[in-house]
Image: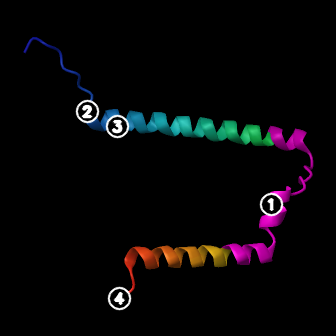
Amino acid sequence: YNQTIDNESAYEILTAKLQHAAAEVEKAKAAEAEAKAEGKKGAGRRTKEPPTLTEQILNNSAVKSSLRTAATMLTRSLLGVLLGKK
């Protein structure tokens, strides 16, 4: 009975934490918006880099189709061996 007790309720503690978190989020948003604005000023128009040889090959529709077929056949054969035909 001789000890002093903190009169701050759980509601008050949680409210303070939420307000602190909201302030941090607002600070982060402001910093992000500022960085974005600075990025637009200095960046100008960026040119797109040409695709690498690997990207060119993988974007080819014939290669995509053959890879898809190979993957399907491999999956079916593995599942056939593992599950067995009944």
- Residue receiving disc 4: 86
Q: Who's the residue at 40% across and 33% down the image?
A: 16
Image x and y of residue 54, in percent: 80, 58
For residue 4: magenta?
Answer: no
Closer to viewer: mark 4 or mark 1: 4
Give the main secondary structure, helix, strand or loop, of the magenta stretch. Answer: helix
Q: Which residues are magenta?
A: 38-67
- Residue receiving disc 1: 55
Mark 2 surroundings within 10 Å by alpha-carbon count, few (fewer than 14), some (14 through 19), many (20 or more): few
In which image quadrant can residue 44 be found? top right
Closer to viewer: mark 3 or mark 4: 4
Outermost residue toward the bottom?
A: 86
Outermost residue toward the top?
A: 2
- Residue receiving disc 2: 9
Q: Quadrant of the C terminus?
A: bottom left
**Label whose residue precedes the other's in the sequence (2 or 1):** 2
Q: Who's the residue at 51% across and 77% down the image?
A: 77
CB within 8 Å, label 1 to label 3: no
Whether 44 is drawn above or below 31: the answer is below
**Label whose residue precedes the other's in the sequence (4 or 2):** 2
- Residue receiving disc 3: 14
What type is the residue that disc 2 sits on?
A: Ser
Measured in 3D between alpha carbons, the distance from the residue under mark 4 to the one under mark 2, in whole angstroms, is 67 Å
**Label whose residue precedes the other's in the sequence (4 or 1):** 1
Left or right: 2 as drawn, with respect to 40: left
Closer to viewer: mark 1 or mark 3: 1
Image x and y of residue 4, in percent: 17, 15
